[in-house]
Image (spheres, helix red, strand yellow):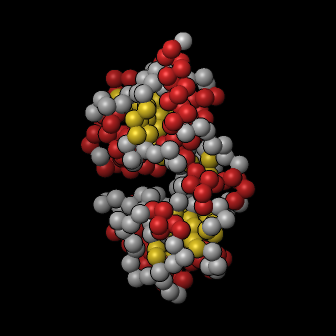
């Protein structure tokens, strides 16, 4: 059996995630003793042995819907977002603080991966709706890596998951050289999933009970406020923009005009 909470798992939060899973397991009355780490996310998500994991809205609506069960959605109490929702934060170097997002047209955009809701889909929809086209695209492989690319001057701006941005500000020194520029509209945040055939209601109740029973330090480290139920239709209704290949074609065409 597999339990996996890799989305916000970093050295500073790992022990808190371990305590969280231990509590879920206790309320559930079974499950693997320890969280799986350093595993391929897609192998975890598609495993028939999956008890609990957390995925992103974009992979869920484009590839995982119908192949996994949606369990529930954590509420992180993010500013400007309804319970169970989050958004993307456009960040740039401190020297660009206060500039409008439109001033980044034609500049280098760092993104974590093409199947990221907060790193690619939401920001690209946001930019498209404002007729803003970036310049070169810099794929980094992770939100923190995107932030580092901006801080080090390898990219000019990036869009980060709002909770990841909070964690970066809490723990990473390079964050002092970065500034928030703008935020996208909220969408449902990263849902908990399980394999088909699992008793979803029992798992939802176990997670909900575990969150309620967490000590204040653990809850604060994980930014967990509660658990809500958001229907699959709300995830499926979120728009999916063209990917990097088509976007780069648009960028090249714009450079020729």
Kindly indicate the quadrant of the structure image that contains residue 177.
top left
User: Which residue reaches farthest bottom?
Assistant: 29
The C terminus, quarter of image? top right
Rendered residue at 45%/62% (across/down): 41
Rendered residue at 53%/60% (across/down): 55
**Foreground residue, 140 or 218?**
140
**Foreground residue, 243 or 222?**
243
User: Which residue reaches farthest top?
Assistant: 257
The answer to whether residue 184 of the structure is visible from this angle is no
**Foreground residue, 43 or 26?**
43
Q: Report the number of numbered marks.
A: 0
Q: Position of residue 112 (x, y in %)?
A: 43, 44
- Apparent side of residue 218 relative to residue 45 in the rendered image (left or right): left
Q: Looking at the image, is 141 positioned above or below residue 212? A: above
Q: Looking at the image, is 29 positioned above or below residue 69? A: below
Kindly indicate the quadrant of the structure image that contains residue 207.
bottom right
């Amino acid at each position: 059996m597999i339990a996996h909470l890799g989305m916000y798992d970093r050295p500073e939060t790992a022990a808190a995630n371990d305590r969280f899973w231990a509590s879920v397991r206790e309320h559930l009355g079974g499950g693997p003793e320890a969280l799986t780490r350093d595993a391929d996310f897609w192998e975890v998500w598609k495993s028939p042995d999956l008890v609990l994991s957390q995925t992103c809205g974009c992979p869920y609506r484009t590839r995982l819907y119908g192949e996994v069960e949606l369990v529930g959605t954590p509420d992180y109490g993010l500013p400007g977002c309804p319970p169970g929702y989050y958004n993307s934060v456009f960040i740039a170097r401190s020297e660009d603080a206060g500039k409008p997002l439109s001033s980044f047209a034609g500049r280098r955009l760092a993104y974590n991966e093409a199947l990221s809701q907060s790193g690619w889909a939401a920001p690209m929809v946001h930019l498209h709706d404002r007729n803003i086209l970036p310049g070169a695209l810099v794929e980094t492989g992770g939100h923190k890596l995107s932030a580092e690319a901006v801080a080090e001057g390898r990219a000019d701006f990036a869009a980060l998951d709002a909770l990841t941005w909070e964690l970066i500000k809490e723990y990473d020194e390079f964050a002092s050289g970065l500034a928030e520029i703008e935020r996208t509209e909220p969408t449902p945040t990263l849902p908990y999933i399980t394999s088909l055939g699992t008793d979803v209601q029992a798992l939802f109740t176990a997670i909900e009970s575990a969150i309620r029973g967490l000590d204040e330090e653990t809850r604060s480290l994980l930014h967990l406020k509660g658990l809500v139920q958001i229907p699959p239709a709300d995830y499926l209704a979120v728009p999916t923009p063209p990917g990097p290949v088509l976007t780069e074609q648009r960028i090249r065409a714009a450079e020729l005009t």
